[in-house]
Image: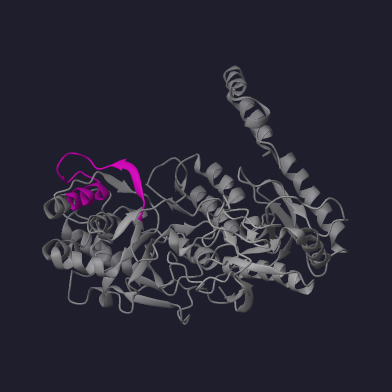
Amino acid sequence: MSPSLNTIVPLHVQQRVYRALPAPAWRVVRDVGRGSTSLQAAARDLRLERMRRAAADRVEGPVTAVRYRGERFLARPVDTFSASAVLAANAAFVADALDGAGIRYLVVDAPVNGRRVLAVAEHDRAAAWAALDAAARRDPAYRQQVHPRGNERSRRLSRPAGRVPAGDAYTVFRVLAAPGAAEALCGPELGCVLEFWRVLAEDQPDDHTTGEPLAAGSWVAPRRNPWVDALPSTIGEPARWDVDGVSRPALPVLTPRHAYDVDFPVDVVYTWVDGSDPAWRERKAAVHSAVGLGELNEFASNESRFLSRDELRYSLRSLDMYAGWVRHVYLVTDDQVPPWLDTDNPRLTVVSHRELFGDRGRLPTFNSHAIESQLHHVEGLSDHFLYLNDDFFFGRPVRPRLFFEGNGIAHFFPSTAKLGLGPTGAFDRPVMSGGKNNRELLFKAFDRTVTNKFKHAPNALLKDVLAEMEERFPEQFAETAGHQFRHPGDLSVVSAFHHHYAYLAGRAVEGRIRYLYADIAAPETARRLERLLERRDVDTFCLNDHDTSGVDPLEQQHMLHGFLSRYFPLRSSFEKSES
């Protein structure tokens, strides 16, 4: 793994050099330290090409060499990619190798969109690694120790026999990449975890690990898992679980459905607009003139709110790649459809504003608050759903438990940003005025004060809670739905009001999410996105535009498409084949 500048040169030394050197010279020093100069990039590419050529005759099928999280790997080029399929394939690779060698194993866990965990007895350690080495002889695969203080460097399987790996748990994985790409699509995070369980040589009347007596021959887990700390030898034959469509030997629990599992349907709703459509712009201009420019906050109808940079295409790719458990996608539009969208996809429904609003509100509308206040009226929508703007993206495999609990309550993600203390005013930004209006209603309903905004992340929503809110506050919902542009009297229903209301009603709790928010017009965004591309280490990210002037719009467009096409390079199931 390439060392960073901070690991080579202490920070205080960097600061002294920074103060002593002119800015251009410092940038050269910094880029060399980061390994981001063109010469260093060319040298890395040359090493990758040598690696690919050296392996080409030793593996079956096409192979390439890529960088991922500071390491170099042999990778299989693929035309399609989904995390769930890769998780299943890596688990099958390990299980089939163990089956082929006659080695007993048990499935310990197989969570939705999570790494499958297999257990092998400690005394079968050497035989298990020999079986995996043999399976990987012509198929490049890797192992990486799962370490409590962070994962270690990866090692290629099928190497000449040597010391048997001694750790408690390893992830076994193959690396995949888009054709011609220098970056990998996945690595150890989608591997199959292989654990080595300690086998008791004698009876333990009171095992200190489990708190129950264990007979000789019992298996003791090396790490925590959702199910058991030990498998008593008196339990008998293993159970059989259906894991990715294959019956596998597994822990003999009552059912593989854990109380905490989210196994109810979850849909996704997007709202989308093509601000370059002449007919739509004509409708907007007519309504804008009728409303009167002087009555609107500058952020109520600013162009960036309606600008489409093809983000929806890449957001749907991210959903296909990293959230394949989503049941159905609803796209809410003003009778607009992207030309590349496959509307025949059975998992997709396009919903017009006319269908959404029915006899409520006022159309045409250019007010996202108004549109969002009606989302629970989408016909066929599941009781639990996620609402995404088209500039939200899944950044790595996510599980439904990131957004909901197994008992059905939702998660929300508070921000450290606060609502202002003053009353709602015409000069408030719409996000502020909406939050203040929410706060007033919540105080009247629950005698509680709310103070925070929320992160720019997917909103986990409950349809019955939204219906209850509309029934409880019909005038405020009707007023919001009737404003054709963002208005100081609006509620921000799905991005804030729902979360606070559901929490106070006992239907939601605070969740934790690793996310990135970036203003694409900020000068530092390009550097942040390059790091994100290298690490792929956030659950979700949002690429937003505040109409700032830090970066030229054409440069923004180039940066955004360059990044998104590398992060999500493969066409999703929602795109036409010719697009």
Viewer-closest of 324 and 446:
446
**Quadrant of the rendered structure where residue 138 is?**
bottom right
Query: Coloured how?
Result: one colour
Residue 561 in percent (x, y) is at 54, 56
Image check: 409 left or right of 104? left
Q: Quadrant of the N terminus?
A: top right
Range of residues picked out in magenta: 412-439
Query: Vertically, is 8 above or below 124?
Result: above
Task: Look at 68% across and 63% down and name the residue there.
Answer: 217
Count of numbered badges drawn on the protein: 0
Residue 270 in percent (x, y) is at 38, 66
- Regarding residue 365, the answer to whether it shows in the image is no
Viewer-closest of 91 and 371:
91
Residue 510 in percent (x, y) is at 35, 52
Task: Look at 71% across and 67% down and name the residue there.
Answer: 94
**Quadrant of the rendered structure where residue 425 is?**
top left
Query: Vertically, is 260 above or below 166?
Result: below
Viewer-closest of 388 and 551:
388
- Regarding residue 520, the answer to whether it shows in the image is yes
Q: Quadrant of the C terminus?
A: bottom right
Question: Would residue 424 be counted in the magenta stretch?
Answer: yes
Task: Look at 28% across and 69% down and name the residue there.
Answer: 463
**Quadrant of the rendered structure where residue 569 is?**
bottom right
Image check: 387 left or right of 313? left
Viewer-closest of 59 and 490:
59
Task: Look at 23% across and 50% down and name the residue there.
Answer: 435
Question: Would residue 61 be counted in the magenta stretch?
Answer: no
